[in-house]
Image: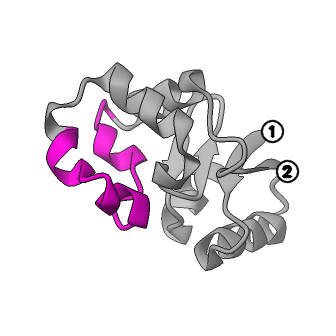
Amino acid sequence: MIKIYVYAKCSTCRKALEWLEGQGIPFEAHPIRETPPSIQELRHALDQFGGEIRKLFNTSGMDYRAMGLKDQLPTMGKDEALKLLHSNGNLVKRPLVIGKDFALAGFKPAVWQESLA
């Protein structure tokens, strides 16, 4: 079963959950702000994204901008970045799906169809 991290007030997250239900794909939903992904899950996603740490960050989020991460991220170590993501679910791109052999960040139906259906 896949694990999906979502924010209840996010319309994209709601669309993703509806899509999963419509496809009959079983999932376990977790509130991303209250229970951010573990460091291990984030590391798994990072591996799936070819080591591109920026793909894990919600670059349009207020916390990302307020913390000036656009300038800090290029020089930040991966371990430091993963700890930051784990400590603040608002920084994680959502929805975030963690599967056994894959990870998805953001909701793009065509990509999800290819990976999940």
* Quadrant in the picture for the N terminus: top right
Q: Is residue 64 above or below residue 34?
A: below
Pointer 2: residues within 10 angstroms few (<14), some, or many (20+)? few
Q: Earlier in the sequence, mark 1 or mark 2?
A: 1
| Residue at 46% from the left image edge and 27% from the top image edge | 83
C-alpha span from label 1 to label 2: 6 Å
Pointer 2 residue: 26
Element marked by disc 2:
loop
Assess whether residue 57 is covered by the magenta stretch: yes
Amino acid type assigned to the residue bearing label 2 in the image:
Pro
For the residue pair 77 and 21, the one nearer the viewer reads as 77
Read off the magenta span: 50-73
Residue depicted at x 15% and y 39%: 74
- Can residue 117 be seen by looking at this rendering? no
Q: Where is residue 33 shown, x and y percent of the image?
A: 65, 52
Q: Report the side of 14 relative to 86 (left or right).
A: right
Q: What amino acid does circle 1 point to?
A: Met
Q: Residue 1, labelled with which disc?
A: 1
Residue shown at the point (28%, 38%) measured from the top left: 52
Residue 48 lies, with reference to residue 61, above or below; the image says: above
